Amino acid sequence: MKRQPAVAGQFYPSSPAKLSEQVGSYVTTDAEKEDAVGIVSPHAGLVYSGRVAGAVFSRIRFPHTFILIGPNHTGLGSPVSIMSAGVWRIPTGEVKIDERLAERLKDRCSIVTEDHYAHAMEHSLEVQLPFIVYFSPDVQIVPVTMMTDSLEACRLLGEAVAGVIENTDYPVTIVASSDMSHYVSDSVARKKDAKAIERIEALDPEGLFMTVKNEGISMCGAVPVTAMLFAAGRLGAGEARLVKYMTSGEVSGDYDYVVGYAGIIVK
């Protein structure tokens, strides 16, 4: 099965040349690379969040496979949905699904359901692919979306992801796709997002989950990031570092209603 691009021409250019040019303007090709257990990367239109995503992807050593975990914005499909076979297309190339790893994750985690409908129109994982293809078109992916507010679901998925990575003989990195605060003032976004980022930097999945709830932080990928942190903890991660933070106001000039974007490396 080939998953066709759902947001080409909206979130990023549909022209291969223009997409390559845009991504190239956001990345640093000579940045020092480091191994990453996981990363947090945003998923807005590239004109807004591309600088943050580019900063993160520029600084990691690319693995054989990325496990992509993102929020489900569309409401389609199952609460935790995987697409375990096929290819995802974007204007600049195709990315194969790591079918062996995806099947193992499905087998290991009872809450993970095969459901391509959840992925058909969802943008949170698709907008990671222009950066992945730019640096390495041979990298494979395992796409997972989450539509749940359950801490236990985050734990179950995170532990299952860690389990399959522990038993895989090639490098795997987890990408948690998330934007930060939505449609608040720039000052409010920065204040609230700092509290969430602090919990991520502390490698504290429960703390992040509760902080987002208690502080009313409109972080759309809090659940995927929480799951990634559970996995990272089991995999022995000892550090999380903010690479770049910005808001949409820095692009649009509208500082009254912004969306925040954070790029974080977990290692």
Image (spheres, rainbow, N blue to C red):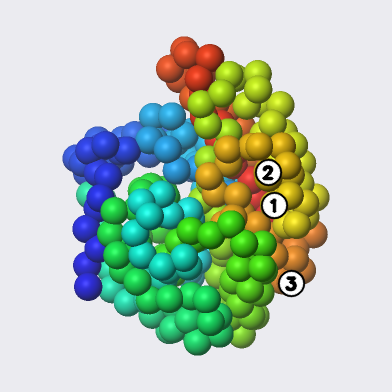
Disc assigned to residue 234: 3
Disc assigned to residue 90: none
- Residue 117: x and y in percent read 29, 65
Mark 2 and mark 3 lie on one chain; the one further toward the N terminus is 2
Give the Cα distance between marks 3 and 1. 17 Å
Q: Are marks 1 and 2 in contact (CB under 8 Å)?
A: yes
Which residue is painted at 35% across and 71% down in the image?
115
Q: Amino acid at mark 2?
A: Val
Furthest-left residue in this view: 15
Q: Point out the image quarter for the C terminus.
A: bottom right
Is disc 2 placed on a helix, strand or loop?
A: helix
Given this view, does label 3 or label 1 mark the residue nearer the observer?
A: 1
Left or right placement of residue 141 versus residue 176 in this view: left
Q: Are marks 2 and 3 in contact (CB under 8 Å)?
A: no
Is 263 in front, or is 115? 115
- Residue 69: x and y in percent read 50, 60
Above-or-below relation of 148 to 162: above
Is disc 3 placed on a helix, strand or loop?
A: helix
Q: Which residue is mark 2?
A: 212
Is 27 in front, or is 128? 128
Left or right placement of residue 163 versus residue 114 in this view: right
Above-or-below relation of 218 to 170: above
Disc assigned to residue 209: 1
Given this view, does label 2 or label 3 mark the residue nearer the observer?
A: 2
Q: Amino acid at mark 1?
A: Phe
Left or right placement of residue 174 versus residue 115 in this view: right
Dot 1, crowdedness within 10 Å: few (<14), some or many (≥20)?
many
The answer to whether residue 140 is visible is: no
Which residue is painted at 30% across and 38% down in the image?
12
- Residue 82: x and y in percent read 41, 71
Give the Cα distance between marks 2 and 3. 22 Å
Q: Quadrant of residue 38?
A: bottom right
